[in-house]
Image: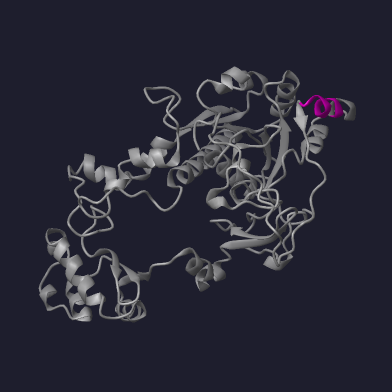
Amino acid sequence: MTAAPPDTLTDAAPDTGPAGILTGYTVIDCSIAMAGPFAAQRLGDLGADVIKIEPTTGEWQRHAAAGGANGTEINVSFLSLNRNKRSVAVDLKNPDGKAALIELVRTADVFLQNYRPGVASRLGVDYESLRAINPGLVYVSISGYGEDGPYRDRPGQDLLVQAMSGAMLSAGRDGDDPAPAGQYLADAITASTAFEGVLAALLHRERTGEGQLVTVNMLDALTTLQMQELSVFTVGKKPQQRSAEPHAHVYIRAPYGVFRTSDGFIALAFADLGELGRLIDEPRFAGWKSEVEGWSRRDEIYAWTEAKLRGRPAAHWLEVLGAAGMWVGPVYGYQDLVDDPQIAHNGTFIEYEHHTEGRVKTPGFPYRFAKTPARLYRGAPRVGEHTREVLAAAGFDEERITRLLASGAAAEPPPSPAVPTSSGAPDSGRAATAASVPEAASA
């Protein structure tokens, strides 16, 4: 991917780069929190014009900063999930605000929401209502557990879905407390699933002219992600049984896990037992077959391997085992990851000047297209930053826009604060005020 050097990127630069794959498509993003906004952001990264519809007081995530990472005006959570979008702030409970949204829907290609069950119908923005206005619309509805069924009204929150997925009992020691993933895994995979659904539905529309309803739920997304593991359970009839040592997965033979060294940890997977025994000077592995004792004697293999690895530093074992072709790697924290030379070579992170937050560095794009690269078009917007711009382009005259703003049916931000310097400015720390996700089915 050809891109400007990191120190030249700006979210306010003129749009002079190559068109993205989705350039010309318009997405109405009515979602909040993570799964929906992340899916919409991926569409924006590919060039779609993503119009974020949010309340006049701002979307929930603006008031709930993960890690307490507040910004000058936009917290890091919101900033990380809402680049390449324009913000239109309208009150959908106000008839004039809702009418403004309906006008935007008439010419949109995609409508995405993750309201609680019944909210879309109550607001008059359910699929059937919007389909009547725009038959070619791809309408994406994200929920926690499904559009109906016994869990329809349960809160679809990442940790709760992870806990139901069964995956917490696939790693670690027997008897240990279940441990969630170190990522917002259910949200992230749901976002990717919704993103895939949009692309497939748009392809169908290109072929047939038909729009359609696409439903995605967090529980199914995380369950089907475990295609291999659950098939081993349902087809292979193998019990999900952890053992005495902390293996990284119940359905993988030993050695497979994270092992302590004299100064840290390494990860080791699928090592040939005879060769491993030679390299770490463990004669008890001699003659063992990886696909036999690797299953029947997993706990001994783990314990004896770690006892040997504890005698030398991680760098020694990475060199010795790696040179022998073993699948071995370092165990990183975030700083290690950010500083890694392969990450730098890949251009995994992007840096740019944000118009309120100053210099920022975030993960970039997980794919490379030779002809139509994903790229930064703009940083995350302020609340209602593009209300006038978008409504004017939709045919609203200045008098009508002014009336919407004056009545509170729509909103725009005050003049932008000074941009902090990259050397670091005081954090104004916009206070978190929302205690829950009031309208969302998935978070």
Image point (41%, 30%), residue name: 145
Q: Residue at x 34, y 38 (%)?
A: 164
| Above or below for 422 versus 238 | below
Measuring from the top left, give residue 1's x and y in whole percent: 62, 62
Question: Horizontally, is 98 left or right of 157 in the view?
Answer: right
Q: Nearer the viewer, residue 396 or 63?
A: 63
Residue 85 location, quadrant: top right
Q: Is residue 152 above or below residue 267?
A: above
The structure's colour scheme is one colour
- In the figure, 104 relative to 48: above or below? above
Does 83 sit left or right of 332 as displayed? right
What is the x, y in percent for residue 43?
A: 61, 44
Q: Residue at x 27, y 49 (%)?
A: 177
Q: Which residues are magenta?
A: 402-408
Q: Quadrant of residue 202?
A: top right
In magenta segment, residue 370: no
Q: How many marks?
A: 0
Residue at 53% over, 56% down: 366
Q: Does any portion of residue 191 appear in the rendered image?
A: yes
Residue 46 shows in this picture: no
Q: Position of residue 270 (x, y in %)?
A: 26, 65
Q: Main secondary structure of the magenta part?
A: helix
Q: Quadrant of residue 125?
A: top right
User: Residue 293 appears at what percent x and percent y?
Assistant: 12, 63
Relative to 151, is 356 on the left or the right?
Answer: right
